Amino acid sequence: MKTFPPDILLVKSKAGQTYWLAQHVVMKIGGYSEEYIRKRRNYYIQNVPISQRLWDFMPDVNKLWRWARKKGTFYYAVDNLPARIRKQAEEYARTYYPQQNSLKSELESYVNNHYGDYYALYADEGGVRARRLSEAAAVLVWAAEHFPKRGRKAFLEEIVKLRYDYIPRTWHTLYKKVRAYLEGYPVDELIRYPRPGNTNALRYTDTEVESWIIQLRNSGRNYTNAYIVRKITELCRLNGKAAPSERWIENYLSKHEVKQLTAAGRWGSGRLANRYQAYVPVKRPMFAGDVWQIDATRLNLIEHTAQDGKKRHLFLIAVRDMYSGDVLGYHFDYKEDRWSVLNAVKMAVMEAGYLPYQMVFDRFPGHNTPEAEEFFDNLRALGVKVTFTHKATGKASLERWFATLQTVFLQDSDYYYGEGIQSRRYYAHRSPEYLARLRKRANKEGWNLTAAVEEGIRLVEKYRNTPYAAYSRKYAQIDQSPKELHEASEKPNTRPVTREILYGLFAYKKEVSIKRGGIIRTEIYKQELYYQITDYEVVKRYPKVWIAYMPDDLDSVELFVRRGPLWLSIGHADILEPVEMYGPQARMNGLGKLKKALADMEAQRQAELDQIISQGSEVEFLLGRYAQKSDLNEAEASLMISGDSTEIKPVKNKKRPPDLNTGDAFLSQL
């Protein structure tokens, strides 16, 4: 035996040489699934004598899918492959080695050039059948012409192995036809369509019956095959029709086109109908940060007792980058709502340090509440594309990751109880005895909310730091973990996150008033706090502002104003420690600093006031001698510089009014 490249073998024996293709080549050429080929192998070996079933190369029992096993790889004899792929398989084999036997090429050349000489003998058959019969006639004529030169058995066996339609499958029967042709029998009597006039194989055709079957199968009641057979038989009897056989109806129901037509009506939008529904292939993004997907799933760890005394399971809300697969943010809760989703996104933004180009959400509970809609509006205002989908296929990458988390990483957890009850995988569920022991041990070890969250964090972080090649055949060449891929990738379509953006999206907010000197007095977590605004423009323009704060950092707050649902940053304020001026705990250290800040604020106010007054105007001259002398001098100087001093003349008032600074005079004018 001579070994060729891994996908092809050449085996020589007394019967001649045989070419074998590896299973992956056959699957690629024919479009077969591995499950289908496995069933064909099992069917073939049932026809092999028991004493020969342990052979590496199965003997030829004149059946399709003759197979062999060599070094852990399955191979299939080219001569025993189905007719529709045999020719392509032979052409594939010829690309790896020269044709060592010219019989096949000679015969194929003769048939292609001369089958038309016999086509008129079979024209009445029409279509493909006439072509196949004329080709078989050409094969018989060529065999008869070369028969005396080539010997007998070996020559005819080579022709039989080519498996032309309407050519005998044994060399002995072909030998009889060759001898008959040489003796003068016409070729159309030796090569003819078998069993002419036989009507046993006629198809049952009745479009109305087919319509009844389709209607019953398309019903949402999801009838069984047996019920449909009984119903069709009854309808045929009532309408005077010949009823089809039970086997015919079941074969009709098993057709792919029938399943395709009736899947939606039979199963609706359920899981079983998914394989027949259309989908759009989604390409992986080019860079990290292009797309984040957000969704939630139950974390299949054993239940624990919550504070309300009920048995509860954790939910995992995850934010996953589609390029790297890294889970940048996650949150654990008893349910999926707007707060849990926002917390997961907050962690992702803080972990990544940027805002992605696009975020894909599902319509989670609370997605249409004012808080969630305000969050989405602010994301859009910052340039993030926000997308919603109500289908699992809209977040297929994240849905597949949930399955990977269970089948690869949760399997290692001592508290994993198996997949959901709808899973039909044979490894999906733990045994009832194991679950009983697991609950007992969990109660003894004090399994609670804190322990469940810690276990969930451990499993997610283990995924983030495990290279893909450690468990994935699809990504066997990737030695980096999701976290490493995300860090190494370029991020050209992202926006860096500043403190103002972070606080505007995720911080707690409350409206406060600005007191004199830019002081803010507020209460957070029942604690009275003071903050100092040093930006004079903020103090001058806004009597009230919204402060944004993080619970873990109260040393400073960000200042915002609202414009509809949007938050606009206007500055920040630092915490101000009140000065203890009296008592044994008196500390005067901060007094000077506070006084300086207040003095600076007052100086900016006075400077702006003086600047406005110094512009000069006609009002100072209209007041005449009742105006301040310094104001008159500054106004006169300003007008002289501008060249307009001659245009203004003070108004003389002969009667002196009462003193405007006295209360009596003010009351007398009322």
Image (cartoon, helix red, strand yellow):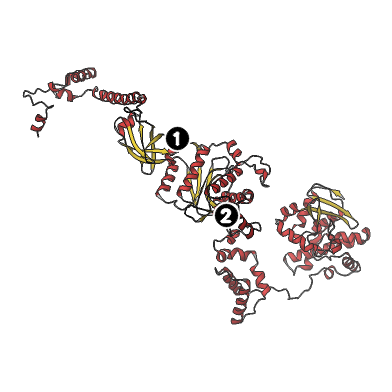
Q: In this view, does 482 lie above or below 516?
A: below
Number of residues whose C-alpha sits closer than 10 Å to that of mark 2, classed few (under 14), some (14–19) or many (20 or more)? few
Badge 2 marks a residue whose secondary structure is loop
Q: Of the residues shown, which amino acid type is indicated by label 1? A: Arg
Image x and y of residue 25, in percent: 75, 52
**Is residue 156 toward the left or the right of residue 377 in the image?**
right
Q: Residue at x 20, y 24 (%)?
A: 617
Number of residues whose C-alpha sits closer than 10 Å to that of mark 1, classed few (under 14), some (14–19) or many (20 or more)? few
Q: Which corner quadrant holds the C terminus?
A: top left
Asked if residue 194 shows in the view, the reply is: yes
Asked if residue 300 shows in the view, the reply is: no
Q: How many marks?
A: 2
Image x and y of residue 112, in percent: 79, 57
Q: Nearer the viewer, residue 586 or 151?
A: 586
Q: Nearer the viewer, residue 610 or 312?
A: 312
Q: In this view, does 155 lie above or below 459?
A: below
Badge 1 marks a residue whose secondary structure is helix
**Is residue 504 toward the left or the right of residue 128 in the image?**
left
Q: Residue at x 11, y 23 (%)?
A: 651
Check disc 1 and report the residue beneath it. 499
Q: Of the residues shown, which amino acid type is indicated by label 2? A: Tyr
Seen as rendered, the residue at the extreme left is: 655
**Is residue 154 toward the left or the right of residue 478 in the image?**
right
Check disc 2 and report the residue beneath it. 279
Q: Tell me where residue 470 sits by quadrant.
A: top right
